Image (tube, grey):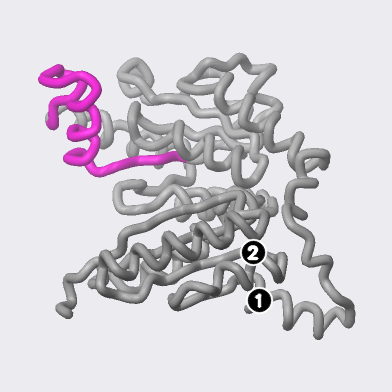
C-alpha cells in the first residue's frame, strides 16, 4: 500500500456531528501528507443506526483496503457497542474526556443522548440567534448610528476582504453582534472615516488582504471590471491601510488566516470574552 492511498474517516454523533468533525479535523490537520475521504453521519441515536454505521465502515475498509478512522461522540453504551462491531481505529471523544471529568468532579455523567440540545432553551442560544440576525441586518454598511451602538464590534475594510463571513462566524460561534462597514473610494479621497464610525472608534477592527488575492476574489464576482483589476485592488488596499493607520485602528491581514484565527484575534483585541458554542 503506498502513501497516497485514501483512507475513509467517519465523524459519527448522536447529534449534528459538528463537535466530532471539528475536533477530528484539528487532529487530521497534523498529517498533511495523508489523504482522507470524509463522511459525517449525524443523529445516530439508536442501535439500528449504529449497526448501519458499522456496515458502512466495513464497506469503506473493503473499498480502500485500509482500516477506517472513526471519530465518535456517541454516549449511549448500546449504540457505542453496535458501532464497534466494525474493525476501525475508534477515537471516542467522549470516552477520552468524560472519564477524567467524572474522576475529578466525583460524580457520574448522565450519558444522555442529545444533552446539548437543551441549549435551544437557554439565554446563550437566544443571544446567538439575535447576533446572527444583527450581523445580517448590518452587513456592508447597512447601519445607522443608533443601531451601531448595539454592536460589540464593527469590522472595516475594503470590499471582499472577509468582513461578512467573519461577522457571521462571530455571531454563530460566540453570540457577538458584529456589524461590518466597507471602506470605499470616497473615504480614501477624504482620508477619513465615515462620520458615523467616529463615535464608535473603540469598537472598530480592520481587515486587509493581499491585492493579488483580492483581485482573484473580485474577478469571480465582477470579471474584467475595474473593481476587480489588480491595479485598483492595490490602490484600495494601500489607501485603506493608510487610513486605518491614520485613525489608529487595529487591523489584521486576512490573506492566509482562517476565519477561526481572525475571530480569535478580534475577540482578544476588542476584549470580548465570549464562550464558543
The numbered mark at residue 95 is: 1
Residue name at image x 70 percent, y 29 percent: 130
Q: Nearer the viewer, residue 30 or 199?
A: 30
**Residue 1 seen in this snapshot:** yes
Graded by Cα atoms within 10 Å as few (under 14), some (14 to 19) or many (20 or more), the crowding at tag 2 reads many
Figure check: 136 above or below 118: above
Q: Are marks 2 and 1 in contact (CB under 8 Å)?
A: no
Left or right of 30? Residue 19 is right
- At 18% from the left edge and 25% from the top edge, which residue is drawn? 228
Q: How far across and how far down the image is residue 181, in percent?
A: 47, 25
Which residue is situated farthest in the right direction here?
Answer: 107
Q: Which of the marked residues, 2 or 1, is nearer the chain's N terminus? A: 2
Question: How far across and down, in percent of the image, does residue 44 sit?
Answer: 61, 54
- Identify which residue is drawn at 55% across, 62% down: 51
* Residue 219, placed above or below residue 46: above
Q: Position of residue 177 (x, y in %)?
A: 64, 34
User: Does the magenta run of residues contain 210?
Assistant: yes
**Spot occupied by residue 119 in the image (x, y as percentages of width and height):** 77, 45
CA gap, disc 2 and disc 1: 9 Å
Q: Verify whether residue 97 appears in magenta.
A: no
**Disc 2 vs disc 1: which is toward the camera?**
2
The residue carrying pointer 1 sits among few (fewer than 14), some (14 to 19) or many (20 or more) residues within 10 Å by Cα, namely: few
Does residue 234 appear in the picture of this structure?
no
Residue appearing at x 76%, y 39% in the figure: 120
On screen, residue 197 versus residue 89, left or right, reads right
- Residue 74: assigned label: 2
Occupied quadrant, residue 208: top left
Q: Secondary structure at mark 2?
A: loop
**Is 161 above or below relative to 185?**
below
Name the image quarter holding the N terminus: bottom left
- Tell me which segment is drawn in magenta: 206-230
| Along the viewing direction, whichever of 28 and 175 lies nearer the viewer | 28
Amino acid at each position: 500500500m503506498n502513501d497516497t492511498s485514501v483512507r475513509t474517516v467517519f465523524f459519527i454523533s448522536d447529534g449534528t456531528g459538528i463537535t466530532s468533525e471539528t475536533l477530528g479535523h484539528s487532529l487530521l490537520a497534523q498529517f498533511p501528507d495523508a489523504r482522507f475521504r470524509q463522511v459525517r453521519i449525524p443523529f445516530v441515536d439508536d442501535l439500528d443506526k449504529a449497526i448501519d454505521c458499522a456496515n458502512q465502515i466495513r464497506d469503506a475498509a473493503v473499498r480502500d483496503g485500509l482500516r477506517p478512522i472513526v471519530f465518535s461522540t456517541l454516549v449511549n453504551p448500546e449504540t457505542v457497542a453496535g458501532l464497534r462491531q466494525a474493525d476501525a481505529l475508534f477515537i471516542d471523544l467522549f470516552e477520552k474526556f468524560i472519564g477524567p471529568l467524572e474522576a475529578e468532579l466525583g460524580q457520574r455523567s448522565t450519558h444522555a443522548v442529545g444533552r446539548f440540545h437543551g441549549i435551544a432553551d437557554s439565554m446563550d442560544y437566544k443571544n446567538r440567534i439575535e447576533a446572527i440576525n444583527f450581523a445580517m441586518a448590518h452587513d456592508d454598511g447597512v447601519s445607522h448610528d443608533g443601531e451601531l451602538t448595539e454592536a460589540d464590534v464593527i469590522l472595516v475594510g475594503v470590499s471582499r476582504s472577509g468582513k461578512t463571513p467573519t461577522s457571521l462566524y462571530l455571531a454563530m460561534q460566540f453570540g457577538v453582534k458584529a456589524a461590518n462597514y466597507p471602506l470605499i473610494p470616497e473615504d480614501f479621497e477624504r482620508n477619513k472615516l465615515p462620520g458615523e464610525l467616529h463615535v464608535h472608534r473603540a469598537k472598530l477592527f480592520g481587515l486587509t488582504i493581499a491585492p493579488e488575492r483580492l483581485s482573484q476574489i473580485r474577478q469571480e464576482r465582477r470579471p474584467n471590471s475595474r473593481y476587480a483589476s489588480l491595479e485598483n485592488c492595490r490602490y484600495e488596499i494601500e489607501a485603506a491601510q493608510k487610513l486605518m493607520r491614520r485613525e489608529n485602528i487595529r487591523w489584521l491581514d486576512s490573506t492566509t488566516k482562517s476565519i477561526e484565527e481572525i475571530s480569535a484575534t478580534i475577540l482578544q483585541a476588542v476584549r470580548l470574552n465570549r464562550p464558543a458554542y
